[in-house]
Structures are given as structure tokens and as C-alpha cells.
Amino acid sequence: MPLPGLNGENLDELRMSAPAINISGFEKIYRARRRGENDVHALKPLTLAIEPGEVFGLLGPNGAGKTTLVKLLLGIVHATSGSATICGHAAGTTGSKALIGYLPENHRYPAYLAGEGVLSYFGSLSGMETSAVRKRSAMLLELVNMTKWRRTRVRQYSKGMMQRLGIAQALLNDPQVVFLDEPTDGVDPVGRREIRDVIGRLRNEGKTIFLNSHLLSEVELISDRVAILKQGEMVRIGTVRELTSSSNAYHIAVAADRAEEFAEAIAPFGPERIEGASALITADAERVNQAIDSLRARGLLITEITPARRSLEDLFMDIVGDNGGDAR
Ligand SMILES: Nc1ncnc2c1ncn2[C@@H]1O[C@H](COP(=O)(O)OP(=O)(O)O)[C@@H](O)[C@H]1O
Ligand SMILES: [Mg+2]
């Protein structure tokens, strides 16, 4: 079900045009308001371009500056220095706001409204015609798989349902760029999967998606690119594949019945970990070949040699550590 406003042809045009989000030296310092308080350097100067149709995941612990960056892009918070554009329009201007959808973190809707009512309410707030709101709501409720619950009051919704309704609300104005701030916070695994599916559908529609998260989940794994923010600074950026490949580590395994001999033979190569007849060693290609020679010299049958990948979660934990949070 294509969302109106984007089809194959003008999507191609969009892809060839300017970045969907172009950030140049964006920086934010929240000034201390009282004596005894310190300034908070929430975002260190950041330069970044996000392409049309890209799903971009911004990861980092609580307090890293993720929400600050989104609020700067929306024009809710003013930058201390730097600038940004959304599809060529300066961030914070009416022109850019018309192109944006936003799911705030911890959003609340009046508990007495049903899902459908929430969408009519926000639609009319944004000046849409009643009939247009009705048509679009029906389509969006379908998109986020909430049609069945459209007449149920939101007070009965699970967190996952609230988030899906929130995504529908963020799409009311048929935005080109959608900001989702902590879409999976407090959502159970099944709910997270449903949100991931919704994001996948939006990507197929050609939307640019910017998502913030302090939790790693499968949702981040569908991002085309991921950046990790720590204390206001972007410490890593790349595809999940780029970030998780570690150049110098290899898994080596031999036939399972020779575990003891294997442990002996591999010991001189300083394995990081040995599990039965397999080991993880950190070495360059030359040294890996020496290890192979040594194993073969003992007549061991090598069953596997693969470059090791770390999970994104390992990387995230390494970078973020115990106290990767607050920007203070
Ligand atoms: N309005 C504000 N005034 C002062 N400090 C703020 C304000 N908003 C956020 N901060 C501080 O800026 C830092 C980054 O916060 P935030 O952008 O909300 O991080 P995140 O979304 O990654 O959890 C935190 O130290 C937070 O306490
Ligand atoms: Mg936040």
C-alpha cells in the first residue's frame, strides 16, 4: 500500500538530490541557569549527512545527547553553533517542518481517546481537512497494524501499541523524514518486532528514517547506518557490518575429537578463548598461516577458519562502558 506523495519515479529524483539531513558543525551547550550548576555540553560539534531513503540509527546511553540532536533538527532547541538542513530547508523553518514527522520519546495521549480519535485530534491540530484526516488515518492504522484497535481507548494499549500509534501520528502529514525517538523503549520483544516491521514498510515507501535508541535491539540492526554517541560526541559511524567486523581476529576449529591436542598446538598463538576444539585468536594473516601449519603438522583436520565478528552489542558495551552516559 503506497503512501501518497512518493512513487518510484519521484523517489529516484529524491535520491539524486540533496541529502535528506545535512548537519554541519551542530553543537549544543545548555547553559547553567543557577549558581552552582554547570553548563552541559550536550552535543559536541557534529557534521553528518543522511541520504534520502536511508534508515539511520543513533545509539548511545541515556544522556548521550541523542534527543538533543533530534530537537535541534526539529527546531525545538536552538544550536549553540552550526547549522543543518532537512531536504535543503534550514532546520527549524516552516519549510523544513512541513517535511518532518516526529515520534517524541515518552509521548502521552489523552487516555480517554481511542486510536482513531488521537489521529483525528492531531490531524485537525495540524490543519488537515476532516475527510482527508479520516482517509489517511484509516491507511496509517493499517500500515502500523492497528486497525483492529482503532476504537479501543489508548489507556488499554500496551507500550508497543502506543508506539505504533505514535508512528502513525508522526506520518499524518506524509513526511519525507521521520524521527523516531526511542521507539522500542519499554516495548517487549514481540512489540519490538512489530515496530521493526513497520520501519521496514516505511523504508520500502522511500521514507528517510532517523531513529534514536539507548537499547540495542533488532530495530537498530535494520539501520543502513549506525552512529554511536557518547557524552555528546560521535565515536563511531558505519554500517552494522563495518562496525562489527574486527580485522585481526579469527575463529579456528578442528575435528571435535582432538580437542586436547588442539589446545596444546594453539597455545603458542595466544588464543583469547578456547572452547573444546575451537578457538578465537587475534593475529595477522601471516601468523594465522603459521598456526595452520602447526595444526596440520600434528595431523589435525581443520574444519573452520573464519574472520570473527563482534556483535553490535559487544561493540556498544565496549565503547559506552559503565559510565558512558551523561554529557556533564
Ligand atoms: N533543557 C535542558 N537543560 C539542561 N540540560 C539538558 C536539557 N536537556 C537535556 N539536557 C542534558 O543534556 C544531556 C543530553 O541529554 P539528551 O539529549 O536528552 O540525551 P539522550 O537523549 O541521549 O538521553 C544530558 O546530560 C541532559 O541532562
Ligand atoms: Mg533521549
Image (spheres, helix red, strand yellow):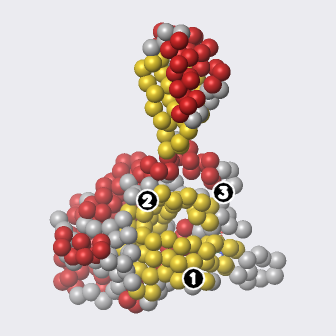
Task: Give me the residue at 59% from left, 15% from top.
Answer: 265
| Residue 12 x, y percent position in the rendering | 24, 72
Instruction: Please state which of residues 33 and 179 is positioned toward the viewer in this rendering.
Output: 179
Q: Quadrant of the C terminus?
A: bottom right
Compared across the picture, whether 72 is left or right of 43 comes to left
**Label 2: which residue?**
225
Compared across the picture, whether 145 is left or right of 38 comes to left
- Any part of residue 117 in sight: no
- Residue lying farthest to the right in this orientation: 36
- Of the numbered discs 3 and 1, the one sitting upstream in the chain is 1
Residue 324, numbered circle = 3
Q: Quadrant of the N terminus?
A: bottom left
Look at the numbered discs 2 and 1 and tell me whether their residues touch, using CB distance below 8 Å: no
Category of crowding for the residue at label 3, using alpha-carbon neighbours closer than 10 angstroms: few (below 14), some (14–19), many (at least 20): some
Compared across the picture, whether 260 is left or right of 209 comes to right
**Label 1: which residue?**
82
| Residue 55 x, y percent position in the rendering | 38, 63
For badge 3, the amino acid type reads Gly
Instruction: Say which of marks 2 and 3 sits in front.
Output: 2
Q: Quadrant of residue 95?
A: bottom left
Task: Give me the residue at 56% from left, 38% from top.
Answer: 248
Whole-Å distance between the Cαs marked 2 and 1? 23 Å
Whole-Å distance between the Cαs marked 2 and 3? 21 Å
For badge 1, the amino acid type reads Gly
Task: Give me the residue at 45% from left, 14% from top.
Answer: 301
| Residue 49 x, y percent position in the rendering | 45, 71
Instruction: Please state which of residues 231 and 133 is positioned toward the viewer in this rendering.
Output: 231
Whole-Å distance between the Cαs marked 3 and 1? 25 Å
Category of crowding for the residue at label 1, using alpha-carbon neighbours closer than 10 angstroms: few (below 14), some (14–19), many (at least 20): some
Report helix, strand or loop for mark 1.
strand
Task: Give me the residue at 44% from left, 55% from top.
Answer: 239
